[in-house]
Image (tube, grey):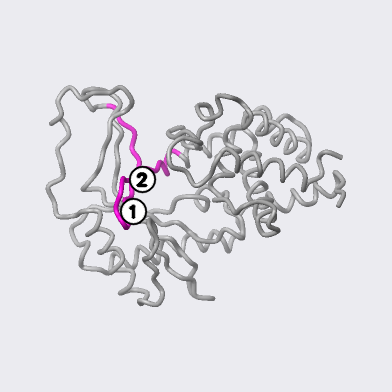
Amino acid sequence: MSMSATDRKALLSGWIKPSSDNEKDQQDRAERMVRDAIESSDAFEGSNYSIYTKGSYPNNTNVRQDSDVDVVVELRECFYWDYGSGVTPADPKVVTPYGGSWTPATWRKAVKSALVEHFGASGVDSSGEVAINISAVAGSRPSADVVPSFLYYRYDNTECTQSEQGSCVFPRSGGAKIVNWPHHQLDKGRSKNNATGGRYKDYVRALKNVENVLADDGVIDDLPSYFMECLVFNVPNSILKSGGSLDDDFRATLVELWRQLGDEDTETAMVEPNYMKWLFQGDKKWTLQDGKDLIQATWTYLDYAS
């Protein structure tokens, strides 16, 4: 089916729209209902913890089909740490180990128990490896993925006086911790969006929407919505906002992504939107080929070759 520039403009104009007031309300309600559940439990009395949303909702890159709100319940009195690349601590004892009773298993269990007590066993699914899901109730509450996490530091000098602060979570069945940088993602995303006059988040939402269409049609495999945010983050600001039309600059964005995905040094060049992780290194839920398939299918779907 052929698609004209006018058709694409209409499609893109709909795709780039940010969250509605109702979706913003879902984010606020999800955080509030999890906070109520945790604060009403005696298990956390006297503990130092923080509750906040992360991911596409606070970053304002969510689209209607990707509906779950990610809510972090982060223990802050117990923290984990690593050292930056090439950093060896001058004194291994400079960081004081935690001496309390919380462990990844007991923290997850306490969070789960508080959620079950508040929402009922039928409303809580703890079978996931990372998040505990609270099911939606129409007209009452949104669905939410609750992530029992710990404060995390990466020390970047031998004296451990310079660090980057993140968050880490341990899989339910065991294994290595998963480190995330939600506050870095939020800050870097806002800066890039401001520098591009809003085009960065516009095009993230557009790419997420077209991925949903392509996955629903069976053209490509379903991909994590975060992956689309990562891809667009790597497009230079000058391309995202070149002064052209919405259609022209989105086309240029796809061209640039295709170029980057085909470079020999892609795995050591493209980053996540936190500047703390490489996009295609480590254990990821996507591959380089996934990126190529997405960009090629998007190009074809929008009929840019005509």
The three-letter code of the residue at mark 1 reads Pro
Count of all numbered marks drawn on residues in the image = 2
Residue 108, picture quadrant:
bottom left
Q: How many residues crowd mark 2 within 10 Å: few (<14), some (14–19), many (20+)?
A: few
Q: Alpha-carbon distance for marks 2 and 1?
A: 8 Å
* Residue 117 x/y as whole percent: 30, 74
The residue at the point 33 percent across, 50 percent down is 169
Q: Which mark is residue 5?
A: none
Q: Secondary structure at mark 2?
A: strand
Q: Using the image, determine if residue 192 lies above or below residue 135.
A: above
Numbered range of the magenta stretch? 162-184
* Residue 222 x/y as whole percent: 60, 54
The C terminus: image quadrant: top right
Q: Is residue 189 left or right of residue 178?
A: right
The residue at the point 17 percent across, 22 percent down is 90
Q: Which of 135 and 191 lies nearest the eye of the viewer?
A: 135
Q: How many residues crowd mark 1 within 10 Å: few (<14), some (14–19), many (20+)?
A: some
Residue 298 counted in the magenta span: no
* Residue 260 x/y as whole percent: 62, 29
Q: Looking at the image, can residue 134 be seen? A: yes
Label 1 sits on residue: 171
The three-letter code of the residue at mark 2 reads Ile
Q: Which of 176 and 19 lies nearest the eye of the viewer?
A: 176
Q: Secondary structure at mark 1?
A: loop
Q: Which mark is residue 178?
A: 2
Q: Earlier in the sequence, mark 2 or mark 1?
A: 1
The residue at the point 57 percent across, 58 percent down is 66
Q: Is residue 63 left or right of residue 102?
A: right
* Whether label 2 touches label 1, CB < 8 Å: yes
Q: Is residue 216 left or right of residue 272?
A: right
* Residue 256 x/y as whole percent: 68, 30
Residue 169 counted in the magenta span: yes
